[in-house]
Amino acid sequence: MRWLINLLKKSDKEGIDISIREGISGYYYYHIAINEIPLCGNKNTMKTELPLASWGIKSHIGETYCKECEELWVKRKKK
Ligand SMILES: [Zn+2]
């Protein structure tokens, strides 16, 4: 996932806080957030320890990753 590598690089280079946030409803639903605000605008999220590099990985707990956040990020990179 090249976009994810770019995201990690950007986070380092520009010193902006890009993180993964988890939906408060549970179900291991994750968003990509810049300075703690998810790209998709979902306000019902909380901090999580999940590192950015784990985005998209599915384990036995059945994580889901916000498609909207992912698409918004990919589009953002193309500009
Ligand atoms: Zn999202």
Image (tube, grey):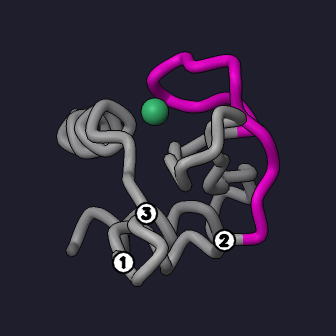
CB within 8 Å, label 2 to label 1? no
From the image, tell me which residue sits under label 2: 50
Identify the residue at image location x=40%, y=82%. 59
Q: Nearer the viewer, mark 3 or mark 2?
A: 3
CB within 8 Å, label 3 to label 2? no
- Disc 1 secondary structure class: loop
Q: Which residues are magenta?
A: 35-49
Left or right: 50, with 39 as reference point: right
Identify the residue at image location x=57%, y=19%. 42
From the Cβ of disc 2, is ligand 1 less than 8 Å away? no
Q: Nearer the viewer, residue 49 or 52?
A: 49
Q: Residues within 10 Å of mark 3 (few under 14, many from 20)?
A: some
* Residue 68, disc: none
Q: Residues within 10 Å of mark 2 (few under 14, many from 20)?
A: few
Identify the residue at image location x=74%, y=52%. 17
Identify the residue at image location x=24%, y=45%. 74
- Disc 3 secondary structure class: loop
Q: Residues within 10 Å of mark 1 (few under 14, many from 20)?
A: few
Left or right: 52, with 59 as reference point: right
Which quarter shows the N terminus? bottom left
Which quarter shows the C terminus? top left
Is residue 32 depicted above or below 57 in this figure?
above
Is residue 29 depicted above or below 45 in this figure?
below
Residue type beneath disc 1: Ile
From the image, tell me which residue sits under label 3: 63
From the image, tell me which residue sits under label 1: 57
